[in-house]
């Protein structure tokens, strides 16, 4: 006859082999004799039937940060670039993540690479460089719709870097320099225009009030005397120029 303590030890070992502990961020999908059970196990202490009858797969529900390697892309205007991105996603349905796809991590990574090449190849280079937010939203929307049957939610996509060929970088540098020169010339021309308008307004005021011409003449003499102390000045009455001013 088998001793009682041996039977108790066997029972205890059987119970312990069926104990599973899930963390707060984990969910358990249980297969019983190959059939997926409809109830997903919650965090905490869970018991399953041991001896291979039940098998539990733990699914992590935390956000996964996946780096998409650089992809060779030819834009719509025939420019060859390298584009890489980072994708943020998480599992929202544990049963689908197990039943609908073999490896949701690998599948999402491959889908992100192909989607990145496809979306960037449909756009022109200027759009890729200037409309980064729209590009990110477009890729995120496509990925989210494609991974929804897998129980995966793509929350964010960020294009990290766009590498341009050397000749394209030089061409863009020349373009930027030409644009800066154009803006400088426009600003200079506007300044000349404003100065001319102010001088014209001042001339009109002097013409309407001749005394201002004499005051300006005296101010000019004072400035010359201050800056050049070794120069001797002989003031000439401004009245001598009245006839010339009237002819003008």
Image (tube, grey):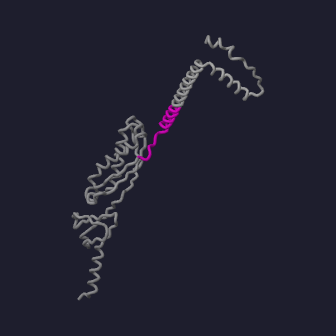
Residue 23: quadrant of the picture: bottom left
Q: Is residue 70 above or below residue 31?
A: above
Location of the N terminus by quadrant is bottom left
Region rendered in magenta = 159-180
The residue located at (29%, 48%) in the rendering is 145
Along the line of sight, which residue is nearer the eye, 237 or 70? 237
Q: Residue 221, how many percent across, how many down?
A: 70, 24
The residue located at (28%, 73%) in the rendering is 18
Q: Is residue 177 above or below residue 87?
A: above
Q: Residue 54, how many percent across, how many down?
A: 25, 69
Secondary structure mainly formed by the magenta segment:
helix
Residue 226: quadrant of the picture: top right
The residue located at (31%, 57%) in the rendering is 91
Magenta span includes 175: yes
Magenta span includes 97: no
Along the line of sight, which residue is nearer the eye, 205 or 192? 205
Q: Disc count in the image?
A: 0
Residue 83 left/right relative to 207: left
């Amino acid at each position: 006859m088998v001793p009682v303590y041996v039977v108790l030890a066997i029972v205890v070992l059987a119970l312990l082999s069926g104990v599973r502990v899930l963390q707060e961020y984990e969910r358990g999908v249980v297969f019983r004799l190959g059939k997926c059970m409809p109830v997903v196990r919650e965090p905490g202490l869970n018991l399953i039937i041991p001896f291979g009858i039940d098998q539990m797969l733990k699914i992590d529900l935390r956000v996964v940060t996946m780096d998409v390697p650089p992809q060779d892309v030819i834009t719509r205007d025939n420019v060859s670039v390298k584009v890489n991105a980072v994708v943020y996603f998480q599992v929202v349905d544990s049963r689908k993540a197990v039943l609908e796809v073999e490896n949701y991590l690998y599948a999402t990574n491959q889908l992100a690479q192909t989607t990145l090449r496809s979306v960037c190849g449909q756009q022109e280079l200027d759009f890729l460089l200037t409309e980064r937010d729209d590009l990110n939203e477009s890729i995120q929307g496509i990925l989210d719709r494609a991974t929804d049957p897998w129980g995966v939610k793509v929350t964010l996509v960020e294009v990290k870097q766009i590498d341009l060929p050397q000749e394209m970088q030089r061409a863009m540098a020349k373009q930027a320099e030409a644009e800066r020169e154009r803006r400088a010339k426009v600003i200079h021309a506007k300044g000349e225009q404003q100065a001319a308008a102010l001088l014209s307004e001042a001339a009109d005021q002097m013409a309407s009030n001749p005394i201002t011409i004499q005051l300006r003449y005296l101010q000019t003499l004072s400035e010359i005397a201050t800056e050049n102390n070794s120069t001797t000045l002989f003031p000439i009455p401004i009245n001598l120029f009245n006839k010339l001013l009237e002819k003008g």
